[in-house]
Image (cartoon, rainbow, N blue to C red):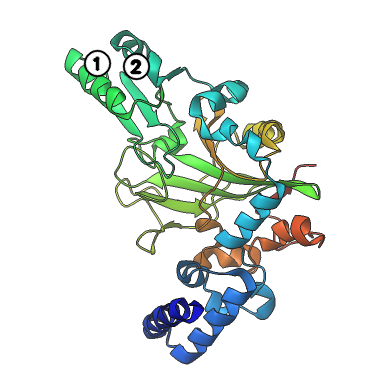
Amino acid sequence: MKMIGIIPARKHISAFSKQLSEKTGLDSRVIFRDIIRAKRINHISLNEYEWTGYYKLSEEQKRSVSTLWTRAQFRKTFTDRRYISILMNKYIFSKVFSEFYGRKCVRMEDVSPAVLKELGGELGKVVIKPGCKGQGKGVRVFPVTTDGEIQAAMDYVRQVKNGIAEEYIIQHEALAALNPGAVSIVRFYSLSSPAGSYLFAPVLTVAISKAISNGCQDALTAMADIRTGLVISDAVDQNELVEYAAHPITGVPFKGLQLPFWEETIAMMRRAVPLASKISNIGWDVAITPTGPLIIEANTIPGFNTAQYRGYGWITGNFGYQPLFDEGMKGVPFTLDERFEKVVLRLD
């Protein structure tokens, strides 16, 4: 029975190897053998293999690549699932992290036309988020100035039923310059195990044309220096594998942008991460407003593409983030050296 599954899988890998060979000029047979070996090491997916530039890494660098599978093993080992609802239920999250939430939030079952009007305020916009969809799916921004607009928002509320409605965030002018039509976010990753707690790989995420900034759908992502808040890379569209030095609509450059309130942002994360330490690996989405940072939400299975994108490998000397996870899983001490100084902070 196993052979039935293995043969089609190898055919798929072979076809992928030939396609990647055409892009890179490498021998497809070499790529094929490398993928088979990599799957034994960390169950790497074909998307991860190409995205990280695995085929051009040294053996030491290859073993440092973190994959969806290795992170899943880490979560199974160190996450107490009784606490997952703190992040999965958006209303509970708004209450647990109320110190950092910074906006009004109402459960879907309590939403009425009057509530929408109140949430809209002078800006006249509300955000409606279905419960537990992930990847920004179903999240909508509604104008709520006229009766017709309020009715349209109410129709959507009745359609999705479970979730929240909340005030629209006004972002800092430095980020609004990149895209004034959508709130840009900074994605942080955190890791917690008995071996230690880390904050790492801050990723600026800016929508291209949609109203929601989400790297899985319609956004450009760039790396920031975790110690200074300075954007240190161009941005990549991780769906199209196209890089941009500047936003394609506004023309504002990414590299060199100083993210405001950075010290306050890191201080906020130092206080927030311990509140969810029972959940071992989290992706935190942070907005920066004219008065400081706030947390939008946190994700238990966070996307990890930009953090290990091959075009930004120079930031860590082409090393991935698996050594952070190995400290907890294998007892191998993580060394915070020059490779990781721009992207990793130890929190304890």
Q: Is residue 171 above or below residue 206?
A: above
The answer to which of marks 1 and 2 sits earlier in the sequence is 2
The quadrant in which residue 292 appears is: top right
In the rendered image, is residue 227 in sight?
no
Above or below, comparing residue 329 to residue 20 in the picture: above
Q: Which amino acid is tagged 2?
A: Gly
Under tag 1, what secondary structure? loop
Q: Which residue is mark 1?
A: 145
Look at mark 2 in the image and give the residue it sits on: 120
Give the answer, above or below, for where 235 lies relative to 34. Answer: above
Task: Give the quarter of the figure containing the C terminus.
Answer: top right
- Residue 142: x, y in percent? 28, 26
Q: Does residue 67 appear left or right of residue 32 in this picture?
A: right
- Which residue is located at x 51 percent, y 72 percent? 49
- Residue found farthest to the front: 1
Query: Vertical placement of 187 versus 22: above or below?
Result: above
Amino acid type at mark 1: Thr
Query: Where, by quadrant of the figure, is residue 134 drawn?
Result: top left
Residue at the outermost top position? 114
Q: Quadrant of residue 158?
A: top left
